[in-house]
Image (spheres, grey):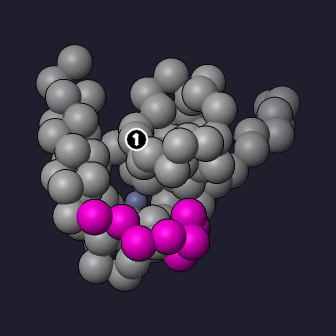
Amino acid sequence: MSMKKVPLRQCIGCGEMKSKKEMIRVIKTAEDEIMLDATGRKNGRGAYLCPSKECLKRAVKSRGLERSFKMAIPKEVYETLEKEMEELGKS
Ligand SMILES: [Zn+2]
């Protein structure tokens, strides 16, 4: 069995370590915008979440995004993230 090293990232919701491919990246752009980065290719400071609304909710509660991005995150941003998460779940 070959053990390929997979870079692990920690979910800011549940705290589980998973491979990047299984996670959704949330980024802060240079303009201080917070958005989901479904492609994983956008520039910006990133945090990782499982593709689950539960983890997003937990991250909201624990203020994981605030801590990752060192900024206050408006409620509307969370609502947008939640919608985007739903969209991703559909495909
Ligand atoms: Zn999670």
Horizontally, is 83 left or right of 29 in the view?
left
**Circle 1 residues within 10 Å: few <14, some 14–19, many ≥20:** some
Q: Residue at x 81, y 34 (%)?
A: 4
Q: Residue at x 36, y 66 (%)?
A: 73
Whole-percent x, y for residue 90 in the image: 16, 24
Where is ligand 1, by quadrant?
bottom left
The stretch of residues the image draws in magenta is 67-74
Q: Residue at x 20, y 64 (%)?
A: 75
**Along the viewing direction, whichever of 89 and 2 lies nearer the viewer:** 89
- Residue 29 highlighted magenta (yes or no): no
Whole-percent x, y for residue 81 in the image: 27, 46
Residue at the spot of label 1:
35
Q: Residue at x 57, y 72 (%)?
A: 70
- Residue 72 highlighted magenta (yes or no): yes
**Along the viewing direction, whichever of 69 and 54 lies nearer the viewer:** 69
Whole-percent x, y for residue 46 in the image: 60, 49
17 up-or-down from 37: above or below = below
Name the image quarter holding the N terminus: top right
Would you identify the image quadrant in which residue 35 lies? Answer: top left
User: Can see residue 90?
Assistant: yes
**Ligand 1 within 8 Å, label 1 CB:** no
Q: Amino acid at mark 1?
A: Met
Horizontally, is 46 left or right of 91 in the view?
right
